[in-house]
Image (cartoon, helix red, strand yellow):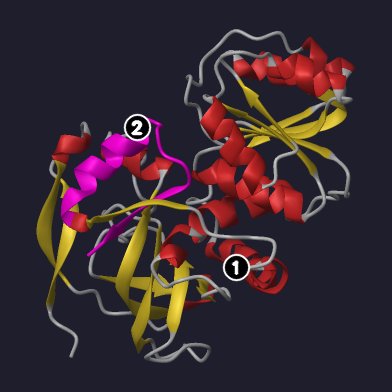
Amino acid sequence: MIPTEMDVVVATEPGGPEVLELGKRSVPSPAAHEVLVKVDACGVNGPDIIQRRGHYPPPKGASDLLGLEVSGEVVAVGGDVTKWKAGNRICALTNGGGYAEYVAIDASHCLTIPEGVSLTDAAGLCETFFTVWSNIFHGHDVKEGMNFLVHGGAGGIGSTAIQLGAAMGLKVFTTAGSAEDCHYCERLGAARAINFHDEDFVETVREAGGADIILDIIAGDYVERNFKAARHDARIVQIAFNKGSKMEINLMPVMLKRLTYTGSTLRSRPDSFKTAIASELQAKVWPLFPKKLVTVTHSVLPMSQAAEAHAMMEAAQHRGKILLKP
């Protein structure tokens, strides 16, 4: 029996983690192309924090609630849905609404649970795998043996990028903030983890011939340092700005090295794009579980502790994903 009302997490106003509180909403009804999912767990991600602060409004038509990925059980399907039925266990990318007991999701953005992955742990898969796959591999000629530099290797995006890069035959370099985090990254498959407090990643990567691909969530002074660490014809992908998005930089290396400097956000991409990424992940990446890929869950907290989950993420002391359970 599907209830009419559900518990959700609401942001009472833009601000810090303390603005997150439990609230009530009506259970959504799935549109013709959607499924209604009873949420087992949802992932906590960087865009959730930015939205909570008031700087990342949801796309038109999307839920105003936080939460961009979930796992759970399909409990109802729209009239046009043929792939899924009630009782299916799935993980999915959402446009919002994951911090709730129920969420309506585009059916083509749902995936099966990979082999060897628990239903709860699966909640932390989609946002990072969609992001890394779409930015690094989708539509690009990525060859085995390329040098791949991943910044912030111990976090959710970093943990996924290291594993996926290594599974695809890339030589992965990563930066992290402690010896323990470096060991963690190397266990995930990094060929070399660089403690940024003690070493200069530019020197280390250049000694290895330079990076062919760089995935950066830091920005700030890392932008110019990435230019220096990059090999000729390299591709640098910016997906977050932990040290700020405004800086004065010398663009001469971009021209002299023929660098491609790009970036993207996933949430604003068309539904058709996300459908294509979901299809590629299901066919090319999900079969790599559990031999070459594993889930990395740092903490699972009750939804009532969403504020604590956000504070934990902002402190950047976690390894892997932070999840919330209704």
**In the displayed structure image, the side of residue 85 where residue 102 appears, left or right:** left
With respect to residue 248, does 258 lie above or below?
below
Q: In x, y percent, where is residue 69?
A: 41, 60
Residue linked to disc 2: 314
Magenta segment range?
Answer: 304-326
Residue sitting nearer the eye, 102 or 149:
149
CA gap between label 1 and label 2 equals 28 Å
Task: Tell whether position 314 is magenta.
Answer: yes
Instruction: Name the quarter where the N terminus is drawn.
Output: bottom left
Residue linked to disc 1: 278
Residue sitting nearer the eye, 240 or 192:
192
Task: Tell whether position 52 is magenta.
Answer: no
The image quadrant that residue 99 belongs to is bottom left
With respect to residue 244, does 65 lie above or below?
below
- The answer to whether residue 147 is visible is yes
The image quadrant that residue 153 belongs to is top right
Q: In x, y percent, where is residue 255?
A: 84, 18
Q: In x, y percent, where is residue 44?
A: 36, 49
Instruction: Name the quarter where the C terminus is drawn.
Output: bottom left
Q: In x, y percent, where is residue 280?
A: 69, 68
Local SS, label 2: helix
